[in-house]
Amino acid sequence: MSPAIGGTLNRVDGRFKVRGESRYSAEVPVTNLAHAVIVNAKIASGRITAIDTSEAERAEGVLAVLTHLNLGRVATVPRLLPSLAGLAAPGQTFFPMQDDLVHYGGQPVAVVVADTIERADHAGTLIRIEYETTPATTLLDQARDRAYVPERIFGGLLPGHSSRGDVAKALAEAEVCVDATYRFAPNHHNPIEPSASTAVWEDVDRLTVYDSTQGPNAVQFTLAELLGRPPISIRVVSHAVGGSFGSKAMVWHHPALAALAARHVGRPVRLVLSREQMFTSCGHREEQEQQITLGARADGRITALRHHKLSLTSPFDDWAEPSLQSPSVAYTSPHYEGVYHLVRGNTITPTFTRAPGEATGMFALECAMDELAERIGIDPLELRLRNYSATDPESGKPWSSSGLTECYQRAAELFGWRDRDPRPRSRRDGQWLIGSGMASALYPVTQPVNPQRSRARLYNDGTAVIEAGVSEFGTGVFTAMTQVAADGLGIPVERVRFVGGSSDLPNVTAAVGSAGTSAVGSAVHLAATQLRDELIRRAVADDHSPLRDADPANVEVHDGKMVLRDRPDVGETYADLMHRTFVPDVEVLGTWNPPPQDVGYGVHTFGAQLAEVAVDADLGVVRVRRMVGVFAPGRVLNRKTAHSQLMGGMLWGLGQALLEATRMDPRLGRWANASLGDYLVPVNADAPDVVVDTIEVHDEVVNPLGMKGVGEIGVVGAAAAIANAVYHATGRRQYELPITLEKLL
Amino acid sequence: MKSYQAIRTTPAPDSAVVRGPGEVEVRLRVNGATRTMSVEPRVSLLDALRDRLELTGTKKGCNQGACGACTVWVDRRRVLACLTLAISCENREVATIEGLADGDTLHPMQQAFLDADALQCGYCTPGQIMSAVALLAEGHAGDDIEIREWMSGNVCRCAAYPHIRAAIRRVRDEKGSGDAAR
Ligand code: FES
Ligand code: FES
């Protein structure tokens, strides 16, 4: 690898962002633009009995009011399939405004289009809707008795039930048992950019949608099915996306509603969700409860793990975030049982939320591990080491790479873990009780199923453009791809421009499941290296080249110059060759075929999380004083941006542990705190300094560059480390997130 | 580089003339230039900047005063543009992120954000930077505790906070808080 990879290159899009020049989806200049506003159902279950739009229609500047009576039917509602699959990826198997039924609070019931945003907003308030209300289920507690075990969850990708060995027998024989139930409040992603779609029909069968999404192609394919048009008539552009965290991973209703509204009024239409609508329009982490039973020998060796999850899903889909997957392989446990239980309620289908499943599942497991360590009387870190599994406990196959024990070791050093007095309430700093806790982090390495493509074009001045359809929502992927391309071509990063964010570009999967950078990176790597090889091939075949008749395998490229490996003074630049042969540019399409789902190895990313908290002895206020996270995500393309993402993930864990909860008002069937003032996310004052380090494990199985992803692993285990630290500080176990102060009084 | 210390302008004239509710002509001074537009009095400064003047560097995160993405300066003070009516800013000096750099040369705070990787998605960033520059001028960057407190009106969901603090410290330490704002 050349110096282009690794390192700490500043974000290539950073310059535009600090100047306020990046155009997000609601900011692309469009002439003759009209503004659309969605009106949402105020009830959670029932039927619209009357809808009076006359006053809204008469209001100044209003161009149209659309309801189920005049919107028209969508062609097909595709079934829910995670966007990693590379196909249409609706967030739920339901499209609103097709009939008079209301299935959940906040369901879209009307769209108002006007010439200004203020007028559209105002007209929305003038629509009068009458409902017939039927009883709604919006909390787990209302419907436990109706729980069922689904055959498959997660868009059909995972089984609802799995087991190995005989868990009941193993638990009965266990020398030590920990049995605990953990409850999790619903969480909302709340990216600071609300989702926005700007739809422009250039003519009757050419639609461009500027959309805030993790996958422009997923939006294109979903719109094609909903609108009943071929993909060639739809272009989706996403230049810059203001955060997502899963809220923009699937395709929700607003891009299609914007397109339908634009067609109706014959003008481009911009539809921006309000902050309140962000709580009812793009899924959430569902309310859930997890029961863990750990059986172990007296020395701490785990013999059995039973892990059940109960959660609320929508009337349309069997959705549960896959909380049981990573815990099932975290430690050696010969006997295992994992079961998802679902309850149907009046909600939008829940969706991916950063570290979807692992954030909650590993919380439960890692808190139970802390209890087990205490029960047995050994250090929590030592307990993890005793149960470290060198193979995937599920398949028995070796890990493609791990690094977990190195992560523990390095994190413990950075934190000063060895000096810890294990007794709860053993440290005090004036008013504050001080405690520290730890947890393991695991996240599966997910792979796209379809080929990933990228195009590389080298110009005869030695600069290159690299293209792929991936969007940039804060992951640093444009920066990392610039580096991968520069490395593959053997030219400096300054001579590379990466272009992404459009469905017109070579197709890559939506950047989800921490797989975005590795999927597109593999394609970019192949495109760049194949382009390099093509230039070398031409040089050695050219009579006038100093490299004539050289063995291509003996040619390497530095700074745009192809030279003999053993005689670096012999060679010529790409530019020289291309000028001499009258070639303006050379272009190559790189295609990466992901490995089969069973690669013969266990594939997971590992890490270790440590946290120190201070708890006010009288008031119960918890402050996180410091966090240390060490992860082994395979190859790190850019230390700066990768560490930023890991740090952000860890602070997400802090939010999950202490702050974040969306509260349902069961009387109304609506969220009671749908705003950034009431749904608390970490602010600067909440965020301690965070130490992040990475262990670079070599992995030849996962993809050509050996990357395992950094988008979500930072979240995993962070909340458990904090909860365990709270226990260490106070002597009080925490079984419910978030840990709000009344739980410590 | 532009100064946080804007030119003192005359206070708004106390006028008894009723304007609106239809569209009225509003003149704003934004980043030193006079801009005129026809808007209803209910139009916020944020929507005026973004939708009428195409100054989309100022972001809309909540439209409720809860996230700070829309932070701009009005007469040297940081304000939330989503909670400010455009018409109330007539005869005042409005400064936005687009006016901060000096041509191609970034403001030291912009450069520090870039170098410290104090951004990920970048959507909160213009607001963070407008707050951060003001913070130094206000004298609220003495130590990290102060920075944490006085930057807490700007939510960063990517949670770049430790790096945001590092960027602010760098500008503070390079310049001394007195003239860092310039
Ligand atoms: S948009 Fe003004 S504070 Fe959020
Ligand atoms: S950089 Fe994404 S919200 Fe701050």
Image (cartoon, rainbow, N blue to C red):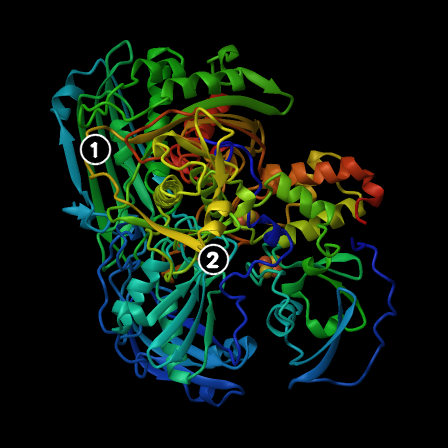
* Position of residue A221 in the picture relative to residue A683 (left or right): left
Relative depth, front residue between A271 and A236: A236
Residue A588, which numbered label? none
First in sequence: mark 1 or mark 2? 1
- Residue neighbourhood size for the residue with mark 1, other residues' Cα within 10 Å, grouped as few (<14), some (14–19), many (≥20): few
User: Above or below — where is A155 with respect to A485?
Assistant: below
Mark 1 is on which residue type? Val
Helix, strand or loop for disc 1: loop
Q: Position of residue A86 (x, y in %)?
A: 28, 53
Q: Position of residue A729 (x, y in %)?
A: 51, 22
User: Above or below — where is A724 with respect to A173?
Assistant: below
Residue at the (55%, 47%) spot, across then down: A12
* Position of residue B112 in the picture relative to residue A182 (left or right): right
Residue at the (40%, 77%) spot, across then down: A201
Residues under labels 1 and 2: Cα distance? 43 Å
Pointer 2: what residue?
Answer: A674
Tag 1, which chain?
A
Tag 2, which chain?
A
Please state the quadrant of the image where ligand 1 appears. Answer: bottom right
Q: Position of residue A447 (x, y in %)?
A: 28, 41
Mark 2 is on which residue type? Ala
Discs 1 and 2 carry the same chain letter: yes
Residue A599, which numbered label? 1
